[in-house]
Image (spheres, rainbow, N blue to C red):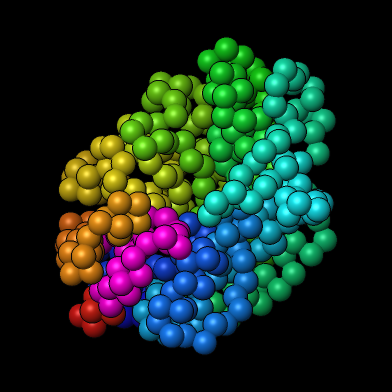
Amino acid sequence: MTSRERVLTALSHKQPDSCPISFGSSIVDGMTKAAKEKFDAFMGYNPIDVKTRHFVMGMVETPPQIIDWIKPDFATVWMKSQWVEKREELEDGSYIDTFGCTVRPISFYYDIVKRPLSGPITADEIKKHKWPDPYSPGRTDDLLEQALAARDTGKAVLLDIPALGPFEGGCWVRGFEDFLCDLYDDEYLAETLMDAMTENTIGFWDVALSKIGHLVDVCGQGDDVAMQDRPFVSPEVYDRLIKKYHKRIYDFIKSKTRAKIFQHICGSAFDLLPHMIEAGVDILESVQTSAAKMDPVVLKNEFGKELSFWGAIDTQKLIMQASPEEFKAAIFKLVEVLGRDGGFVLAPSHNIQPNIPFENLKAMFEAFVEIRGEC
């Protein structure tokens, strides 16, 4: 099988010749710049400059040495997204992002230290807020050329997360405390904000898919609606207030392309999955197995006929605690459990950080090669 055939087979819930593999195909399954630099030193690589794809997370493209080694099954196309835009750079190293948030470097990531819609506000202020312009000049420069080149590789073509989801976007521009309180105390305000975020996100999908929808195999969208031990909101609140916005985005994507849709969610998303399937999600991306209720066996048994899974290699706990041999064994077990009858893309559960034991990152790549060697 070609990589594209392998991916399409797996995402059709059929057994491929080997488990599809992703690393760095998305802004949420690769490595940070700091981790890349440390791994270069660990492996003795000559450092190669690569593009940053998400400023806040510090996520960078996967270096060619690793791509040539592990041969992932995806070729990603990147539009000029919200993640690489800045309205203004400040003298202290902070910057103002495209939403008007002040973002400052803290530890491994940047963090938002000032939000434009925090505190007491009105719905009119939300409607008048300056949102990122999906149709700004240059947004899709060379996008068609990227997609055609990606298709020529024989790999599956991924159009990766171009914009914030409505829930995470509300937390981004308003702040977690204010927005979560709105969901319970001022539904009109919360819905006004999610409506604005949804329309903005659809604009990004519109401008991209109008050019390359016929060439894309997977569309990635993100909206972190879960924490380590539970969702941010109850399933009832999700069903009543948030699901309709997710469905609006997914319905729009499916009106422009036949591609499968992955939804990136960190944390314990289990209780929301029936609703997300109803909303139109095809693939759960990240599968954070260290979070509550995210056991791979249970996920496969409960949702494996309706949902594919992407991720699952634990980059939070196991990568820190296991020996390289134990880490590889856990990866092979994931393929056995989640890859049964297809429906699985093997990948890290999130981006690799610079404080991990790099023996385990090397072991992960070795496991990828062994898995691919089976075909």
Q: Vertically, is 275 above or below 319?
A: above
Residue 325 appears at what percent x and percent y?
18, 69
Start and end of the magenta stretch? 341-367
Residue most extreme to the top: 185
| Residue drawn at x 47%, y 72% as measured from the top left | 38
Q: Is residue 374 magenta?
A: no
Judge by depth and name the residue closer to the eye, 94 or 272.
94
In the picture, the quarter occupied by the C terminus is bottom left
In the picture, the quarter occupied by the N terminus is bottom left
On the question of residue 341 being in view, the answer is no
Judge by depth and name the residue closer to the eye, 56 or 270.
56
Q: For residue 274, what is the image quadrant?
A: top left
Residue 263 appears at what percent x and percent y?
45, 48
On the question of residue 355 being in view, the answer is yes
| Residue drawn at x 82%, y 30% as measured from the top left | 128
| Residue drawn at x 51%, y 29% as measured from the top left | 242
Q: For residue 72, what is the image quadrant?
A: bottom left
Q: For residue 4, what is the image quadrant?
A: bottom left
| Residue drawn at x 54%, y 82% as measured from the top left | 47
Residue 255 appears at what percent x and percent y?
57, 50
Q: Is residue 362 magenta?
A: yes
Judge by depth and name the residue closer to the eye, 184 or 34.
34
Residue 219 appears at what percent x and percent y?
51, 57
Q: Vertically, is 256 above or below 132?
A: below
| 228 horizontally vs 142: left or right | left
